[in-house]
Image (cartoon, rainbow, N blue to C red):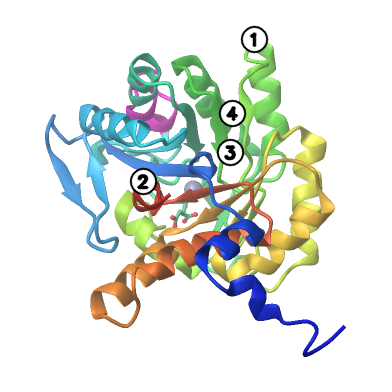
Amino acid sequence: MNFPVTRMRRYRKNSKIRDIVRETKLNKEDLIYPIFVKEDLKDGEKEAISAMPGEYRFSLNGAVEYAKELEAKGLRSIIVFGLPSEDKKDEIGSPAFAPTGIVQRTVGKLKAETDLVIITDVCLCQYTSHGHCGLIRENDDTDFGYEILNDESLEYLAKTALSHAEAGADIVAPSDMMDGRIHSLREILDENGYYNTMIMSYSVKFASSFYAPFREAACSAPSAGNRKSYQMDPANALEAIREAELDVIEGTDFLMVKPALPYLDIIKTIREEFDLPLVTYNVSGEYSMIMAGIEKGYLTEESIMESLLSIKRAGADLIITNFAPYALDHL
Ligand code: PBG
Ligand code: ZN
């Protein structure tokens, strides 16, 4: 039936009508806040992240206090990123799996003092002297003279995940993109009795320039080369299905697509192909891009909730986002 019998504008007459026909809703429990905890900061100190207006690196206690504030506003889950002392970084990323590392201590305190679901980012790049997500070896048959070693890295990633589980993490989230990592993590967790610790794989993670502000925030930029030999080519959509499929076979509990906004098509595909809970990472560059637009006066704050909603509409269940504090205040 068409005009004048059918009038689509009837659905939009006023906010009461719009409210009852709205198809997609964003909920507080959909939000996961990424928090940066820096080992070298003293209690009460926090550092502004210049590439991410409004975001900070916290001390351990400062992070826990901020997490409690967000919990009081309705936040349900948090993902912890650690920044170890620069002088502790080494070739194999030792501070990533130290039992008294910054993430491990933060998790312990968050577990004791909040009811949040505690997720940890499992990777080596913040902890290695070279800033890659795995171990490296010279190899001329590569773009920049170094190979990022796959199988050798798995052992250290698994140790890191285990140390997070021992500290009390509910969910470990490997972001390294080595092949076989989900299997390695599931195996070491189960062998040590952590069969209930969940794995949230960064299954479909693209080699994206939208991570630039994060690398400033986490001091984790690779000192040489790039991450294109392990993170996915932004052009590949079929490959995203294979990456997700392998993680499902290896035993992941969640799938993830990262970044979010430039990859909404991938989110939709993964939603349609798989029935696992789907997480998306609304990454630092997506945050900073909108914040810069607002600061310049080109955009209004409404663009924040609109973009989060678009990620849900594409099919995401959960969204890791630096906009979580803002969204909690506007839901
Ligand atoms: C590290 C990691 C990155 C992000 C999350 N974990 C950066 C990278 O892979 O270089 C990006 C998050 C963001 O940009 O907000 N493995
Ligand atoms: Zn990494």
**Residue picked out by circle 3:** 153
| Local secondary structure at mark 3 | helix
Q: Is residue 102 covered in magenta?
A: yes
Q: CA distance from mark 4 to mark 1?
A: 14 Å
Q: Earlier in the sequence, mark 3 or mark 2?
A: 2
Type of amino acid under label 3? Ser
User: Is any part of residue 37 visible from this angle?
Assistant: yes
Q: Earlier in the sequence, mark 1 or mark 2?
A: 2
Residue at the far bottom in the pictured view? 3
Tell me, yes or no, whether the two marked residues, 4 and 3, touch with CB atoms within 8 Å.
Answer: no
**Residue picked out by circle 2:** 129
Q: Earlier in the sequence, mark 4 or mark 2?
A: 2
Taking depth in this image into account, of 324 and 157 the one nearest to the observer is: 324
Type of amino acid under label 1? Gly
* Label 4: how many Cα within 10 Å (few below 14, some 14–19, many 20+): many
Asked whether mark 4 lies closer than 8 Å to ligand 2, one says no
Nearer mark to the viewer, of 4 and 1: 1
| Local secondary structure at mark 1 | loop
Q: CA distance from mark 1 to mark 2?
A: 32 Å
* Label 3: how many Cα within 10 Å (few below 14, some 14–19, many 20+): many
**Residue picked out by circle 1:** 193
